[in-house]
Amino acid sequence: MNPIRRLGLLGGGVIGAGWAARAVLNGIDAVICDPDPEAGRKVAEVIDNARRAWAGMTLAPLPRPGNWRIVRTPEAAVEAADFVQESLPEREEMKIHLLAQAERAMRDDVIIGSSTSGLLPTRLQSGLRHPGRFVVGHPFNPVYLMPLIEVCGGAATSAATKTQAAAFYRSLGMRPLILRKEIDGFIADRLMEALWREALWLIHDDVASAEEIDDAMRFGPGLRWAFMGTFLIYRIAGGEPGMRHFMAQFGPSLKWPWTKLMDVPELDDALLEKIVAQSDAQAGATGIREYERLRDQCLVAIMQALKTQDYAAGAVLAQHERALWSAQGRAAAAAEIAAPLRLFGGTVEPAWIDYNGHMTESRYLQVFSHASDAMLALIGAGTDYVARGHSYYTAETHIRHLHELPPGAAYDVTTQILGADTKRLHIWQVLHRTADAAPAATCEQMLLHVDAKAGKTCPALPEVQEKIDPILAAHAALQWPADAGRAIRRVPTP
Amino acid sequence: MNPIRRLGLLGGGVIGAGWAARAVLNGIDAVICDPDPEAGRKVAEVIDNARRAWAGMTLAPLPRPGNWRIVRTPEAAVEAADFVQESLPEREEMKIHLLAQAERAMRDDVIIGSSTSGLLPTRLQSGLRHPGRFVVGHPFNPVYLMPLIEVCGGAATSAATKTQAAAFYRSLGMRPLILRKEIDGFIADRLMEALWREALWLIHDDVASAEEIDDAMRFGPGLRWAFMGTFLIYRIAGGEPGMRHFMAQFGPSLKWPWTKLMDVPELDDALLEKIVAQSDAQAGATGIREYERLRDQCLVAIMQALKTQDYAAGAVLAQHERALWSAQGRAAAAAEIAAPLRLFGGTVEPAWIDYNGHMTESRYLQVFSHASDAMLALIGAGTDYVARGHSYYTAETHIRHLHELPPGAAYDVTTQILGADTKRLHIWQVLHRTADAAPAATCEQMLLHVDAKAGKTCPALPEVQEKIDPILAAHAALQWPADAGRAIRRVPTP
């Protein structure tokens, strides 16, 4: 297949515009046929959303963006295209008609993908002169972010068309799933539809509201489905004895009235054996304990991620953390100030490990920064103080790395106040490997007290100064750290 | 309700042990009745998993862990308990019998929660002397991480019992969903079961394998269900016209053969109005555009989170990033070396913003660290070099903050080589606000060349030295930065 430089798009609605965005971000031009006079504005909005999302998603360097434009005829969209994607409304007759019209203007070697959610490719390709080059490539909304694309051929689709379409979708960052059999709704939509139909019964019967049903998903099974499907999740639930054990425990529930949707498959020996064999093949050589850990790490990572949005399970975590912090706040108020303050510690998280196999440098500063926050809370300059318009900003930081930290290592941080006046706070922090109290890194910082709104330094409020003074006096009696106040030395010219 | 200091647990399997872990981590003692002679070992393993997961999940200070032990009789588990949770196998008769036995040893004010996945509370409470204090509290596996707990009362359950049980579960960091009506399977399991039954049909009919079905979920709809349920996702898909428009478009598909599960609800006007009204109530005053952005931010955050595990959608993202980096690598090889190297840039991500409203300090070091990596790749000391056992480690870092960076701001980093010998690399980096080229921060670093296995410094390999030399020579002609080689100055004693 030739390199794809231009994508011809039939239909510029939510899905078509999503295709344009994914193409443009990956350096591919898009020509979109849509009769809506507002199409240009709408596509531009979707591309803006996509650009914002990708800027937040990846630090990897994106290619120069592709160009895009709206045209009024299918012919104009496809005539110089290297790949054509159809995203018209789900009306079979209309799709068949427009595909045939577009085909007459296309080069012979160009593949046509259809975004249909569930219409059968054998029918959609029925009006084409070259049906072998037609395939369903069913994406999910938003197309510019969701990885899945279901690739489903019809009776006349060639094997090469499926392979080449999958390769193109993969080059855009997507995850093709090639179907082995043609079926209405393909796979994902059949699963979504089953759940949806049961959900409609729950509303119909006044068992739950739309919001309650959504909550039952997003705080529960939905969290797991973001990274493992129902079979692997059930396999893990079965524990060491695996899938056969799970099916023995929960197979009988197929006969229970747990859905209103009837016509349930008979769980005979043949079906049981098939499920067990497929589950074994899926799990491969990885044991249940490993999968358990992976599941937990993924759940943790997702809840932390959602915490950055203060939404769904992330909001639940954030609320629990606030409760834990305020319990600690009550304890910190009684902290010992004669020694360097020991207000913060934890363990090195797996996500903090860089390609050298130990804690990456920016996480050192993150840990020191959390320890500073605990010290600021202690002197009454915590988040409440910030909300009232004042804060301490970091002006300078000097970090010295003394030991590496492996994943899982426990650490704690001490903070010594080296000096302070009304506007400045000069601190010295040591990150200790808790196991042997060895210093793993030191951090010297100069913090400046600011009026955040005015954007300039100003004296700390008296209630903060009153809390700094006794600590400053107590810490004046401590030894001055030998390495404080140092600069990085020049390498002599060889 | 009295503060809950001790949780009595009937059953120490996967679910009971998960309860013990959640309690212990939140400072609550657990007494677990389980006849399995291996119960102690198994519970200890689950608590270890939970401890590891929580250490990775939160920087918030956990209370001193609760104690736990295994006992052999229900009476011993519940006699001094402040709350009792039953997690026995799903056999109704056995549950009824053991609950009645345990009740005789409990204080009268203690609530009994049942972890049943779907048995009816009215039947489970039928053998109790005080059925009013019995309620279902249905958790999800792993109990120590999953937020959802379905709270479902039976006919005899008091309103106070439901409220107090929900408050207790919430204090453990969970998200209670109080059911308005008793139903087999409650809500989440009915939805899971509908999807599962359809999935079994797909296997039965050889449409897809267990692995393919799981992939269709985790790369597709499962990613969205981790934070928004099916109703809100569909509402957003409907665009500005909202839920009524979506139902008009997709309502007819209820009649299509998109599941094998029959007995589908009739979408008459009454049901349609109910759905639309409930969806409006759920969405509240938040507009579709806002929900779209929230959806995108959550998807991005989840994919980034899964990238830390190199799993599921995260592995897809990582692979695409590698392709983008290697395309850039080909461009970097031709980089201009006469000026400070400009190898890295991006935009400030929303997740990087701290409580002061701008980019948090550790993210500055992360950005500088990425720029160093790009420089190391340029001199042939990138990840391939690391894989062969050598690397550059950061020994010292001095950061100076000059300007704040708001969310979304574009930045780029220049890197100047100040000095180098066979083991040392002294660099000067400037992070620029791209819009006006103003320096927002500077970073001076000393990197040491190491033999990673031996854990000590050693000379860089000749092929790397050969690439450093011409850059070092070219940069010797550049101006020495005025602020390089500086130390943090002492605050004079007031």
Image (cartoon, coloured by chain):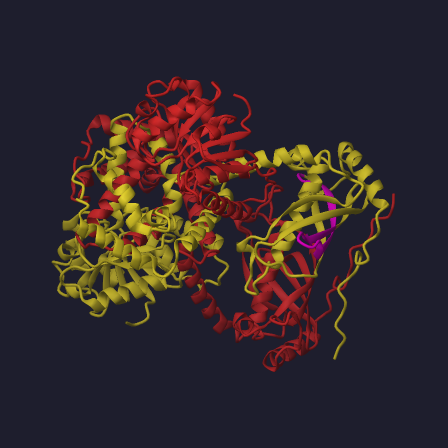
Chain colours: A red, B yellow
**Compared to A376, does A2 lie above or below?**
above
Q: On the rendered structure, is B387 left or right of B493?
A: left
Q: Residue B429 location in percent, x, y?
A: 73, 51
Q: Residue B204 location in percent, x, y?
A: 25, 28
**Compared to A1, does A403 lie above or below?**
below
**Residue at horizontal 48%, vertical 19%?**
A109
Q: Residue A297 location in percent, x, y?
A: 45, 46
On the image, which quarter does residue A17 sit in?
top left
Q: Main secondary structure of the magenta part?
A: strand
Q: Residue B108 location in percent, x, y?
A: 20, 69
- Residue B357 highlighted magenta (yes or no): no
Q: On the rendered structure, is A222 left or right of A106?
A: left
Residue segment shown in magenta: B429-453
**Compared to B282, does B388 lie above or below?**
above
- Residue B448 highlighted magenta (yes or no): yes
Q: Tell how many labels.
A: 0
**Residue at horizontal 34%, vertical 57%?**
B283
Q: Is residue B186 visible?
A: no
**Residue at horizontal 29%, vertical 36%?**
A190
- In the depicted view, which residue is nearer to us: B117 or B43? B117
- In the depicted view, which residue is nearer to us: A202 or B102? A202
Q: Is residue A136 visible?
A: yes
Q: Quadrant of the C terminus of chain A?
A: top right
Q: On the rendered structure, is A79 left or right of B454?
A: left
